Image: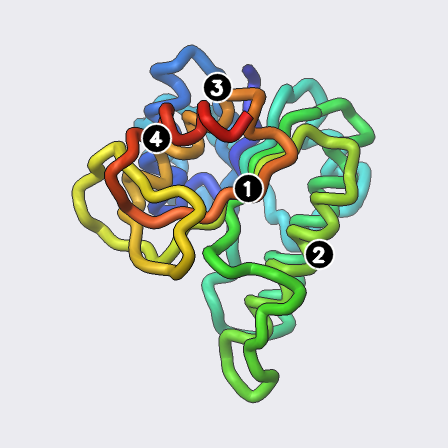
């Protein structure tokens, strides 16, 4: 597949890209800062410089045209609620709409464990803007005609990846960024994960086996 990976300099993206390239995919890694080009391209990706926060519809169409899949790992990283909405909600939704227009039919969203319209985060808490933006983006994705998968990893760590997760755990725990990278690669290889929302922690089941059982 020819993949547009949005948010290519993120920690998870930098771990996922070599796995995707090794699997035979072409990765166009979308980044905003030109200083990150060398690091991104060292993973085997082709760096694409653009600011997703300011892209209009035609710009999104151009970015995604000819791609088979979109992997969304971007995020505003907290901070101002306005920017969080602009990136995690508005830009994400714009990318979904463009993917439908240009035929990039496979769409993989990295969300978070517990993301939901009923997230329950009070408006007074700083996390509210992010929780609301991700919930709106995820819900929009579910309403598209794309072959979508929403991955919902729990609290991210820098532990060494085990290649094993606990899928559909009742409560959030932790998961290594390396394992999240492996779930990206595994989900793209398994059409049965399309149309699924998959929350998970680190656990004991091999990732491919876990995802193979959901189709």
> CA–CA distance between discs 3 and 4?
12 Å
Residue 72 got which mark? 1
- 25 lies above or below 210: above
Q: Kindly indicate the quadrant of the structure image that contains residue 185.
A: top left
Tell me which label, 1 or 4, sits earlier in the chain.
Answer: 1
Nearer to me, 187 or 45? 187
Task: Answer left or right for 173 relative to 147.
Answer: left
Kindly indicate whether the residue at mark 4 contacts the one at mark 1 (C-beta within 8 angstroms): no
Tell me which label, 1 or 3, sits earlier in the chain.
Answer: 1
The local secondary structure at tag 1 comes to strand
Give the percent coordinates (x, y) of residue 170: 42, 57
Task: Answer left or right for 204 relative to 99.
Answer: left
Give the percent coordinates (x, y) of residue 66: 69, 18
Q: Mark 4 points at which residue?
A: 207
Give the percent coordinates (x, y) of residue 158: 22, 51
Residue 73 in view of the camera: no
Residue at point 44% right, 29% down? Answer: 211
Tell me which label, 2 or 4, sits earlier in the chain.
Answer: 2
> CA–CA distance between discs 1 and 4?
20 Å
> CA–CA distance between discs 1 and 2?
13 Å
- 211 lies above or below 12: above
Residue at point 35% right, 37% down? Answer: 14
> CA–CA distance between discs 1 and 3?
16 Å
Residue 189 got which mark? 3
Tell me which label, 3 or 2, sits earlier in the chain.
Answer: 2
Q: Neighbour class for label 1 at 10 Å: few (<14), some, many (≥20)?
A: many
Task: Answer left or right for 58 relative to 28.
Answer: right
Q: Mark 2 points at which residue?
A: 90
The local secondary structure at tag 4 comes to helix
């Amino acid at each position: 597949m020819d993949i547009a990976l949005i948010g290519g300099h993120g920690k998870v993206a930098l771990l996922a890209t070599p796995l995707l390239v090794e699997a035979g995919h072409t990765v166009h890694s979308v980044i905003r800062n030109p200083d990150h080009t060398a690091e991104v391209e060292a993973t085997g990706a082709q760096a694409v410089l653009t600011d997703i926060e300011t892209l209009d519809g035609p710009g999104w169409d151009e970015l995604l045209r000819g791609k088979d899949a979109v992997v969304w790992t971007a995020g505003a990283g907290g901070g101002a609620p306005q920017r969080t909405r602009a990136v995690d909600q508005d830009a994400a939704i714009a990318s979904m709409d463009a993917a439908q227009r240009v035929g990039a039919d496979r769409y993989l969203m990295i969300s978070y464990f517990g993301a939901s319209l009923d997230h329950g985060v009070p408006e007074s808490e700083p996390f509210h803007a992010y929780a609301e933006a991700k919930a709106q983006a995820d819900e929009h994705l579910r309403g598209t005609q794309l072959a979508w998968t929403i991955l919902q990893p729990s609290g991210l760590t820098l532990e060494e990846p085990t290649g094993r997760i606990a899928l559909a755990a009742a409560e959030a725990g932790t998961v290594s960024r390396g394992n999240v990278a492996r779930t990206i690669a595994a989900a793209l290889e398994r059409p049965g994960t399309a149309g699924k929302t998959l929350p998970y922690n680190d656990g004991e089941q091999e990732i491919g086996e876990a995802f193979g059982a959901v189709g």
